[in-house]
Image (tube, rainbow, N blue to C red):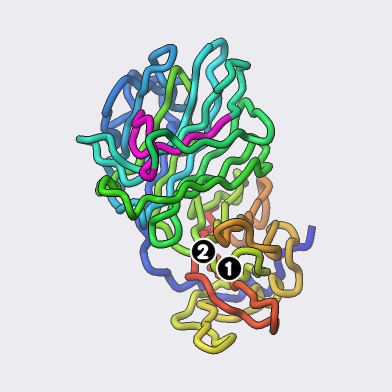
């Protein structure tokens, strides 16, 4: 492993970044017949079992709940959840909704489902509302088959292109990308979502865990804190938009964010105070404890890097906060074309 330079210990704590609305629930509490006071039960029944949320109605009934602590229109929302099947369930699905109106069930609703009854998630559906049976631009859902059926995974949902395009990223349980899927035509619909909630949508007794909803930005870090003693992984999610698709990107870090930051091109400012950590991440891309900090932006200008810490790592860094920012590079002249916001991950004991 390439260690983080020891000189970082001499730096002060990072300057707090602008607050980003975010909620997180790992359901790590005793078994219960309800999810807790932060959840609104819209239909069906979800319970807590084995420190995860689980649908409590067998077969294909729609069950959904929204988090009452989150309020953002779908154009400014991102939701993320881990999902798995319940053993022996014959019909099951798990998904997310953003821009949810609890009164009408409308919103951008995305569901990963076992479509051929083989006991694995194999198809992803985009709906104009929970159980709508339609997409905003057509009378049926938009759907895609996953390249490989999976027993468990992770789903992330947000929007791009001014809110006209819904985007869903699916990973398997090991973090391997299954695909980035899209559905267009939201803005032109008279039924474009007007709600501000985000929530979980399941069929059968599917399992959901580590739910998070956050105010969507060009760089999102979640969770926003890692325990050095316990270890863990923070996702650094890049969303530069369709205009940057296929361009190189570079993620950098610092112990201080800055505004407007360092000028790196005409009208492009890197919102970091350059320090030893910035230089280290520049000189050691894709090196532990980071991964995928340098690469090519995929569909809709998206990429995902990670900061991963094994248990008991870097105990002397407890109390620090690491600011991150990314650049999309114009390949024609190798200069930065656009910079992200700063996103911070705090290091706890």
Residue 158 visible, this angle: no
Question: The magenta stretch spans which residues?
Answer: 123-137
The answer to whether any part of residue 144 appears in the image is yes
Residue 119: within the magenta? Answer: no
Helix, strand or loop at disc 2? loop
Residue in view at x 61 percent, y 57 percent: 303
The answer to which of 61 and 70 lies nearer the viewer is 61
| Residue annotated with mark 1 | 244
Along the viewing direction, whichever of 284 and 268 lies nearer the viewer: 268
The disc at residue 241 is 2
Relative to 283, 127 lies left or right:
left
User: Residue 6 shows which numbered tag?
Assistant: none
| Residue at 41 percent of width and 33 percent of height | 140
User: Front-most of 23 and 119?
Assistant: 119
Looking at the image, do the residues carrying marks 1 and 2 touch, with CB atoms under 8 Å apart?
yes
Query: Residue 164: where, in percent of width, then height?
Result: 40, 55
Quadrant housing residue 311: top right
Residue farthest along the left direction in this orientation: 103
Name the residue at 66% across, 51% down: 309
327 or 320: which is nearer to us?
327
Vertical side of 111 occupied by 203: above or below: above
Q: On the rendered structure, is 180 left or right of 68?
A: right
Separation (CA) of disc 1 from disc 2:
6 Å
Find the residue positioned furthest to the right: 1
Label 2 Cα neighbours within 10 Å, binned few <14 / some 14-19 / many ≥20: some
Residue 127 vs 47, above or below: the answer is below
Other residues around mark 1 within 10 Å, as few (<14) / some (14–19) / many (≥20)? many
Q: Relative to 322, is 335 on the left or the right? A: right
- Residue 8 placed where, x, y %? 64, 72
Q: Label 1's element?
A: helix
x and y percentages locating residue 269 in the rendered image: 52, 82
Residue ID at (67%, 52%): 313
């Amino acid at each position: 492993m390439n260690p983080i330079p020891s000189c970082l210990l001499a730096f002060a704590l990072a300057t707090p970044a602008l607050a980003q609305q975010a909620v997180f629930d790992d359901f790590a509490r005793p078994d219960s017949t309800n999810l807790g006071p932060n959840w609104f039960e819209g239909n069906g029944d979800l319970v807590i079992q084995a420190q995860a949320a689980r649908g409590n109605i067998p077969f294909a009934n729609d069950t959904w709940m929204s988090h009452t602590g989150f309020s953002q229109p779908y154009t400014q929302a991102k939701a993320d959840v881990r999902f798995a099947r319940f053993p022996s369930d014959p019909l099951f699905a798990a998904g997310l909704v953003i821009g949810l109106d609890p009164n009408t069930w409308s919103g951008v609703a995305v569901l990963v489902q076992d479509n051929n009854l083989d006991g694995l998630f194999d198809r992803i559906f985009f709906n104009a509302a929970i159980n709508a049976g339609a997409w905003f631009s057509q009378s049926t859902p938009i759907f895609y088959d996953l390249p490989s059926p999976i027993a468990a995974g992770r789903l992330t949902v947000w929007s791009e292109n001014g809110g006209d395009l819904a985007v869903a990223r699916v990973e398997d349980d090991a973090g391997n990308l299954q695909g980035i899927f899209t559905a267009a035509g939201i803005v032109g619909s008279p039924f474009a979502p007007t709600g501000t909630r985000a929530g979980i949508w399941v069929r059968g007794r599917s399992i959901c865990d580590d739910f998070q909803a956050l105010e969507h930005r060009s760089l999102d870090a979640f969770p926003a804190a890692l325990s050095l003693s316990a270890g863990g992984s923070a996702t650094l999610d890049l969303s530069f938009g369709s205009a940057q698709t296929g361009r190189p990107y570079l993620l950098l870090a610092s112990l201080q964010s800055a505004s407007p930051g360092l000028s790196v091109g005409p009208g492009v400012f890197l919102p970091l105070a350059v320090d030893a950590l910035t230089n280290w991440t520049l000189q050691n891309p894709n090196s532990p404890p980071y991964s995928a900090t340098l690469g090519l932006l995929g569909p809709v200008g998206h990429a995902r890097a990670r900061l991963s810490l094994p248990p008991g790592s870097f105990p002397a860094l407890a109390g620090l906060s690491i600011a991150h920012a990314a650049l999309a590079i114009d390949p024609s002249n190798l200069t930065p074309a656009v910079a992200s916001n700063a996103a911070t991950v705090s290091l706890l004991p």
